[in-house]
């Protein structure tokens, strides 16, 4: 009875505790909702997050994948491009990332047939593009395995396959869905192998046969018959003759034809096209075709009424009769005449006949004088890009004409125009405020010429190397006024110190490439400021004796996208700096260093890695 009474005594106490607990719960605030796990988010939202992460630091994707199983699976579905470091990692990479659509093997110097055969045992049906342009070691067996494993393959780059021939081409032909194919430098390829390709891959849109010396007119004629959907064809440095031209020009969709260095193309070949007319052709490249004269150029221009871009660099002298034929192509927008010799009144004819030009390249041309080119500039008021690199006879007179007539320029390249004065260079910034690219390398530019460039707020590329008169004062104006700057070249600008570089780093957050080679006064302060530029991928500091491992370590930790580095003749950089590179610069692909016996095995291991 005593036990029963004790039990009855405890029951009210339990009821009171339960009542108190229920009252406390009812009076407590509503708990904060828990954020949904990653696996409940839509792939579209999750992939947007991963895209942002990859832009900031590609290595961060690995950390994300290790956070949880859901993150691991999401990163696996997100990856679209694979770039393995070694061929033996190919199978594991394809298994890990079954949704990848592009496979880039350019980092693998040797890819044996066995590695490509391993792809057939993994899930790579999603692959649409494969790049083997820098790889060797595979043959016909590897090509066969690749074609069998990737039924949806549309883009295949097999450039530089100097050991590949007809047998490998026959296996490539099994990839029936190919849209883009490069067989550049297949020097043993013959008409037999190319015939297999064009018969099997009739859906081709782009084809490169550059340096395929064994291909003749017979195969090109078959190509024109079978691949009617071609839009781009590169036959540079092949042995084709005039017999190939009529079939090529009859391709109904051909838009781009590249014939660089084709010695078999002469005036007779171009003259044979006078009765043919290609209304689809928009880009024609005849550069370095040394057997062509102005007569042949005049002949072909009559057959391409819708041409937009013409390249005759290092081809033939430019004469007024040839230029007047340009009136037959009223839509011409780009004209490249690099390395050509201008005859009398040739430049004036360009101003009269090519009023619709948007881009004109006269780099390293002879016979370019102020009077004639000034006349052309006065007519080409819609010009957007002008290249007069190494035109050493031009003076201030021409620059006055350019800046007064072509105020819409977005690109001006005038390297080594040494007769243009610093005063005239000031006109560029004052009148051409839309510039995005400017090259004044090896000119008389000084700080007074840099200051007007502050108006060029859209400037993204500035090359002012070997401009010995500029100092921190002028460079500071650029840093304060050009926030979109991505590429700056200050090679051998000996008057610069840290202050100018610091202003560039602070004012140009989108900076991707900077060349400070032989700027002997800069120190680690410059590198510490540049380490804040997260997008920096190219840094050249060759011959900067005051740079040490301390500055390089800051770059390694801050610039995770760094891929190209030149530190030759930086003798204060030792093993410590190299160790920081090995730990943080995982995107590094090219390092230029000075061989030195003082370096220890640690540094050598880093370079090998």
Image (cartoon, rainbow, N blue to C red):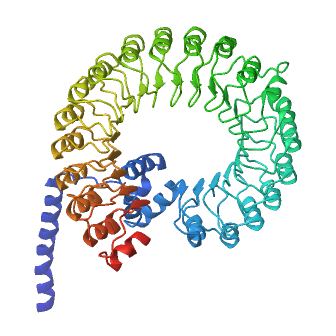
Report the side of 432 relative to 274 (left or right).
left
The quadrant the N terminus occupies is bottom left
Q: Nearer the viewer, residue 102 or 334?
A: 334
Q: Quadrant of residue 139?
A: bottom right
Residue drawn where x is 12% and y is 73% of the image: 12
- Does the image show residue 183? yes
Q: Is residue 582 above or below residue 34?
A: below
- Does the image show residue 37? no
Residue 449: x, y in percent?
Answer: 25, 25
Q: Is residue 600 above or below residue 230?
A: below
Residue 210: x, y in percent?
Answer: 70, 46
Residue 415: x, y in percent?
Answer: 40, 32
Q: Is residue 575 above or below residue 397?
A: below
Numbered label tally = 0
The quadrant the C terminus occupies is bottom left
Q: Nearer the viewer, residue 353 or 434?
A: 353
Q: Is residue 249 above or below residue 563?
A: above
Report the side of 176 relative to 518 (left or right).
right
Report the side of 279 relative to 314 (left or right).
right
In the displayed orientation, state which residue is furthest to the bottom: 2
Residue drawn where x is 61% and y is 68% of the image: 110
Residue drawn where x is 15% and y is 77% of the image: 11
Q: Quadrant of residue 545?
A: bottom left
Report the side of 124 relative to 534 (left or right).
right
Q: Nearer the viewer, residue 244 or 127?
A: 244
Q: Nearer the viewer, residue 105 or 376?
A: 376
Residue 88: x, y in percent?
Answer: 58, 73
């Amino acid at each position: 009875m005593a036990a029963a009474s004790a039990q009855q005594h405890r029951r009210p106490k339990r009821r009171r505790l339960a009542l108190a607990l229920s009252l406390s719960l009812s009076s407590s605030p509503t708990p904060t909702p828990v954020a949904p796990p990653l696996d409940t988010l839509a792939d579209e939202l999750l992939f947007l997050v991963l895209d942002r992460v990859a832009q900031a630091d590609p290595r961060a994707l690995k950390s994300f994948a290790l956070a949880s199983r859901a993150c691991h699976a999401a990163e696996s579905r997100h990856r679209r491009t694979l770039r393995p470091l070694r061929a033996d990692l190919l199978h594991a990479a394809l298994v890990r990332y079954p949704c990848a659509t592009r496979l880039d093997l350019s980092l693998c110097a040797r890819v044996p047939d066995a590695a490509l055969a391993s792809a057939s045992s993994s899930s790579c049906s999603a692959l649409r593009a494969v790049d083997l342009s820098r790889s060797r070691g595979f043959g016909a067996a590897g090509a066969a395995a690749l074609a069998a494993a990737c039924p949806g393959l549309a883009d295949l780059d097999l450039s530089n396959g100097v050991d590949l021939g007809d047998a490998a081409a026959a296996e490539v032909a099994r990839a029936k869905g190919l849209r883009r194919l490069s067989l550049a430098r297949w020097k043993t390829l013959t008409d037999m192998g190319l015939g297999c390709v064009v018969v099997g891959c009739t859906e081709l849109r782009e084809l490169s046969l550059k340096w395929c010396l064994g291909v003749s007119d017979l195969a090109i004629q078959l190509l024109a018959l079978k691949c009617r959907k071609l839009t781009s064809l590169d036959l540079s440095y092949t042995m084709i003759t005039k017999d190939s031209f009529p079939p090529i020009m009859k391709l109904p969709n051909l838009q781009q034809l590249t014939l660089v260095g084709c010695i078999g193309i002469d005036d007779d070949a171009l003259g044979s096209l006078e009765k043919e007319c290609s209304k689809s052709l928009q880009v024609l490249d005849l550069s370095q075709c040394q057997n062509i004269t102005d007569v042949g150029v005049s002949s072909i221009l009559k057959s391409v009424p819708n041409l937009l871009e013409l390249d005759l660099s290092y081809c033939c002298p430019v004469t007024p009769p040839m230029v007047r034929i340009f009136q037959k192509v009223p839509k011409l927008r780009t004209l490249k005449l690099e390395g050509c010799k201008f005859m009398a009144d040739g430049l004036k004819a360009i101003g009269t006949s090519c009023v619709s030009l948007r881009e004109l390249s006269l780099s390293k041309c002879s016979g370019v004088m102020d009077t004639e080119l000034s006349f052309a500039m006065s007519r080409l008021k819609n010009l957007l890009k002008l290249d007069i690199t190494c035109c050493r006879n031009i003076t201030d007179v021409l620059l006055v004409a350019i800046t007064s007539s072509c105020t819409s320029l977005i690109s001006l390249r005038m390297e080594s125009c040494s007769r243009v004065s610093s005063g005239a260079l000031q006109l560029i910034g004052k009148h051409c405020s839309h510039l995005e690219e400017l090259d004044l390398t090896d000119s008389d530019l000084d700080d007074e010429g840099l200051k007007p460039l502050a108006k060029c707020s859209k400037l993204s590329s500035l090359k002012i190397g070997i401009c010995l008169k500029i100092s921190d004062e002028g460079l500071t104006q650029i840093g304060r006024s050009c926030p979109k700057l991505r590429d700056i070249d200050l090679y051998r600008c000996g008057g610069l110190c840290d202050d100018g570089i610091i202003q560039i780093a602070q004012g140009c957050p989108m900076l991707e490439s900077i060349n400070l080679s032989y700027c002997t006064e800069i120190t680690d302060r410059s590198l510490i400021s540049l380490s804040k530029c997260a997008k920096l991928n190219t840094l050249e500091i060759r011959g900067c004796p005051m740079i040490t491992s301390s500055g390089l370590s800051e770059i390694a930790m801050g610039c995770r996208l760094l891929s190209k580095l030149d530190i030759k003749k930086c003798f204060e950089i030792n093993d410590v700096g190299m160790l920081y590179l090995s730990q943080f610069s995982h995107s590094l692909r090219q390092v230029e260093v000075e061989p030195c016996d003082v370096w220890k095995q640690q540094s050598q291991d880093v370079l090998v890695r």
